[in-house]
Image (spheres, helix red, strand yellow):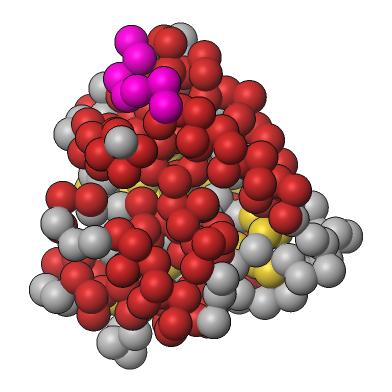
């Protein structure tokens, strides 16, 4: 089998020193296709931590096959998709955790390409997030918002150095302070099922015209963790991010300060990480906005 591996996925794999995985990938896809009776189609671009290819079930149902790159644990994503059961997220059709593979409902075009007005997109993203959020207790094996904030705080200084200090020390310090505050704010009693990376390219149109999310990180966290990614993204729109935060808070009833702090966390960590793996201009855009806000 000949596979077209998107360049950004290839870069992520090579940067992790896992080139041999690329050689094994065609046989892995062929084996999964046989076990799940799939016809494999074209690779889909856009992400960098998984190979995603079009697939068709034996009954003609369109689907996608997703295989996480080495070092990417796809387990939390599978857990979230099971719990969501097709509500707010793509439906999970099959899973193989040994090979970090998921078979998923195939959706349509991203919200970014369908809805022109950014404010309308942000409102729709709030609506789809609310459909996903539901109480989830500590008995569910998902990382928490506190663990995410702690992990990001541990990794950020080293990534910043590795990337060549692409933003100001004050910006890093601001993000670390936000991480500490959101870590302390976590409460298992009010945690909900959280996607972890909501934005206009991760919301695809379903057959009924609604939108569903793809590529969830899968967390037990405060809802503000999700809304923070809406504040993080598309800083080049030119709108006031504080005003955007207030609109999200008003629409969902979530605390604006918590949204802002998660937005800062996602903006800085995602920007530095993107810089470190050469995912541009995304990293540059986020960090330029982060430096402006800190200043």
**Image-based side of 2 in relation to 181, left or right:** left
Q: Position of residue 24 (x, y in %)?
A: 45, 22
224 above or below 54? below
> For the view shown, which residue lies furthest in the bottom direction?
208
Q: Position of residue 32 (x, y in %)?
A: 50, 44
Can the viewer see residue 5?
Answer: no
In the depicted view, which residue is nearer to us: 225 or 3? 225
> For the view shown, which residue lies furthest in the front direction?
295
Q: Position of residue 104 (x, y in %)?
A: 47, 62
Split into 4 quadrants, where in the image is the C terminus?
A: top left
Write the start and end of the magenta stretch as one range. Answer: 164-170
176 above or below 155? below
> For the view shown, which residue lies furthest in the left direction?
116
Residue at 83% x, 69% y: name it: 189
Residue at 31% x, 69% y: name it: 243
274 above or below 253? above
Residue at 46% x, 64% y: name it: 227
**Image-based side of 206 in relation to 228, left or right:** left
Q: Is residue 144 magenta?
A: no
Q: Chief secondary structure of the magenta span?
A: loop
Split into 4 quadrants, where in the image is the N terminus?
A: top left
Can the viewer see residue 127?
Answer: yes
Quarter of the view holding residue 151: top right
Residue at 66% x, 40% y: name it: 180
Q: Position of residue 100 (x, y in %)?
A: 58, 40
**Image-based side of 9 in relation to 105, left or right:** left
């Amino acid at each position: 089998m000949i596979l077209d591996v998107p360049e950004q996925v290839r870069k992520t794999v090579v940067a992790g020193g896992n080139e041999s995985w690329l050689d094994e990938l065609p046989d892995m896809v062929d084996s999964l296709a046989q076990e799940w009776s799939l016809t494999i189609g074209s690779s889909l671009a856009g992400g960098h931590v998984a190979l995603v290819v079009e697939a068709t079930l034996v009954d003609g149902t369109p689907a996608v096959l997703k295989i996480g790159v080495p070092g990417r644990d796809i387990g939390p994503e599978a857990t979230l998709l099971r719990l969501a059961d097709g509500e707010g997220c793509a439906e999970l059709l099959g899973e193989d955790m040994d090979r970090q593979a998921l078979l998923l409902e195939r959706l349509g075009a991203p919200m970014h390409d369908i809805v022109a007005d950014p404010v309308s997109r942000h409102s729709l993203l709030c609506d789809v997030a609310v459909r996903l959020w539901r109480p989830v207790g500590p008995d569910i094996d998902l990382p928490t918002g506190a663990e995410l904030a702690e992990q990001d705080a541990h990794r950020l200084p080293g990534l910043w150095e590795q990337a060549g200090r692409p933003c100001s020390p004050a910006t890093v310090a601001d993000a670390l302070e936000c991480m500490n505050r959101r870590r302390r704010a976590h409460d298992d009693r009010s945690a909900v099922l959280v996607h972890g990376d909501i934005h206009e390219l991760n919301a695809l149109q379903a057959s009924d015209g609604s939108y569903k999310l793809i590529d969830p990180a899968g967390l037990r966290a405060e809802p503000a963790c999700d809304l923070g990614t809406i504040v993080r993204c598309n800083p080049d729109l030119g709108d006031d991010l504080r005003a955007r935060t207030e609109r999200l808070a008003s629409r969902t009833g979530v605390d604006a300060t918590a949204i802002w702090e998660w937005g800062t966390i996602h903006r800085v960590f995602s920007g530095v990480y993107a810089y470190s793996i050469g995912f541009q201009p995304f990293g540059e855009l986020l960090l330029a906005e982060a430096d402006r806000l800190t200043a």
